[in-house]
Image (cartoon, helix red, strand yellow):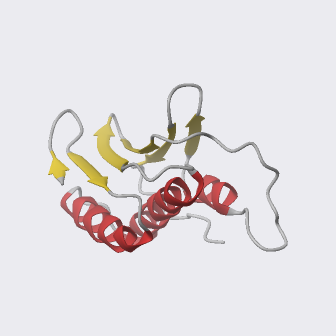
Amino acid sequence: MIETHLWPLTITLGSDVCHLQDIRRLMDAWLETEGCDGETRKAIVLATHEAAANAIEHSQTNSEITVRTRTDDGLIVLEVSDHGQWKHEPPDFDQRGRGLMMISRLVDELEIDADGPGTTIRMMVRRDGNDARSFV
């Protein structure tokens, strides 16, 4: 389901990894309409995919996840939210646990709000034409 409110693109999907391809496709199309090209566009799609994958895998619930995007004064703002419970487990860097580290290298600002019901990952990317994104 796609809704347009204050956020020009809102994607609400079931908590299943099969929906990740839909998120990538819709994000890529929205970024194209916003005139975002190059490495910045690839970085945003990858960061959003990883945040959504984390929400699906780690939220400890089968409820929906929501991806919202908007532009704000030279920034692209993205939020990925779930209705689960934040896991306070140390990452296992031998096998996994690099998702948030990767996201933080792909965006300019990263905030995690796990204080209320569910978790929201907020990512901000400057639209200054800097395509020097750090792919890991």
Q: Please tell me which residue is depicted at 33% across the width and 64% down the height of the picture.
A: 23
Q: Is residue 16 left or right of residue 50?
A: left
Q: Does 86 sit above or below residue 99?
A: above
The C terminus, quarter of image: bottom right
Quarter of the image with the N terminus is bottom left
**Residue plotted at (82% across, 63% down):** 92
Pick whichever, 132 or 33, lies toward us.
Answer: 33
User: In the drawing, does residue 106 fall left or right of residue 80?
Assistant: right
- Residue at the farthest left position: 4
Q: Is residue 90 left or right of residue 22?
A: right
- Place of residue 116 in the rendered image (x, y in percent of width and height, measured from the top left): 53, 25
The residue under the point 31% across, 46% down is 69
Residue 77 drawn at (x, y percent): 39, 42
Residue 80 in percent (x, y) is at: 43, 47
Residue found at x 30% / y 41%? 71
Where is residue 88? Give x, y as percent: 75, 42
Q: Is residue 75 placed above or below 39 in the rendered structure?
A: above
Tell me how many marks there are. Answer: 0
